[in-house]
Image (spheres, rainbow, N blue to C red):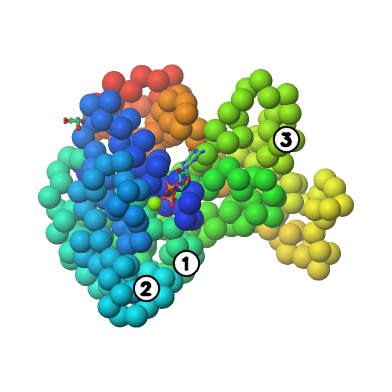
Amino acid sequence: MRYAVLVTGPAGAGKSTFSGSFMTHLNMSRRTAHLVNLDPAAAATSFEYEPVIDIKDLISLEDVMGELGYGPNGGLVYCFEYLLQNMDWLEEELGGFDEDYLIIDCPGQIELYTHHPFLPTLVKNLGRMGIRTCAVYLIESQFMEDKYKFFSGVLSAMSAMVNLEIPWINVMSKMDLVTSNPEDPSGGARNGLRGRRNIARYLDPDPMLLAFPQDERSAPNPRFHALNQAIVQLIEDHPLVSFLALDLTSSDSLETVISHIDYTMQYGEDEEPKEPHDLDEGDFQDLE
Ligand SMILES: Nc1nc2c(ncn2[C@@H]2O[C@H](COP(=O)(O)OP(=O)(O)O)[C@@H](O)[C@H]2O)c(=O)[nH]1
Ligand SMILES: *[C@@H]1O[C@H](CO)[C@@H](O)[C@H](O)[C@H]1NC(C)=O
Ligand SMILES: [Mg+2]
């Protein structure tokens, strides 16, 4: 069985950093993993590991901008169209990996997650090739500083989820920025988060965060009241969007996220079924 994890989310969410830590963790668990880069704009320096497949070998944003005179946004769209038309290139490249685990570092263009056919087509192709796929959607912890920003992040995650019919895990990345100091009596207040309880309300979103503003300054324009109510209702009706906290400075945190990914993809189920609470206890060896 082959496995692929799509590492998705907006630009700067920490996708490439997480992909690298993920690679290291799998290697230390003696599991063979390969990095695939699908971001035509990725800087070579953003990779801790050399990608085995790199979209830049097919087309790079730099070339598109230089030779075809596109700006950065149009250039990216051109790159994705080009990859869509050359899916056989990707299929051929992916064909070389048996029994392996592929970590696919995706681009951060938000259009890709809302209405572009690129990811759905990719997922369909992976499925056809018999590769078991799941997606991880990262948003960074700074999104929790402002509840409106946070809800825009939740909505982008939801819209990505409904576009791709594969198992899905939402991750709140860069948690080291809000929980770095356990002694911090403000419990993250400096980040606009009034205490740990509030962090929990964001990770498992409480729609009332949006419904009842806590202070005047952040009160929404009354014109948006109906829209906010509709969003609150949506999140209550579809309690799909909760986040796993990812703090890369803690190996426990990384292990927890990876065990959820393994469980979601039923990694190693052919060997022995596993319950997620077993995984949380940290016995990963049994999965090999
Ligand atoms: N503090 C902190 N910074 C991070 C973390 N992950 C990534 N970053 C930083 O966030 C920026 C964007 O990360 P990158 O992985 O390139 O994001 P991508 O655009 O989603 O691939 C870089 O400057 C990283 O060093 C994290 O877990 N904690
Ligand atoms: C882990 O990484 C080392 C060094 O790059 C490599 O030699 C080894 O084969 C890797 N292990 C696995 C299981 O891929
Ligand atoms: Mg990146």
Residue 107 location (% of width, % of height) = 39, 58
Q: Residue at x 61, y 48 (%)?
A: 143
- Measure the alpha-carbon separation of dots 2 and 1: 13 Å
What is the secondary structure assignment of the residue under circle 1? helix
Vertical order, 115 against 282 (above or below): below
Instruction: Measure the C-alpha gap from mark 2 to mark 3.
Output: 40 Å
Q: Mark 1 sits on what residue?
A: 111
Residue at 26% in and 60% down: 55
Residue 115's x, y, as percent? 46, 69
Callout 1 crowding tier (Cα within 10 Å): few <14, some 14–19, many ≥20: some
Q: Are marks 2 and 1 in contact (CB under 8 Å)?
A: no
Which amino acid lies under the numbered mark 1 shown in the image of this protein?
Glu
Q: Is residue 103 left or right of residue 227?
A: left
Which residue does the numbered mark 3 point to in the structure image?
Answer: 189
Residue at which label 2 appears: 75
Mark 2: give few (<14), some (14-19) or many (20+) Cα within 10 Å: many
Is residue 221 visible to the viewer in this orientation of the structure? yes
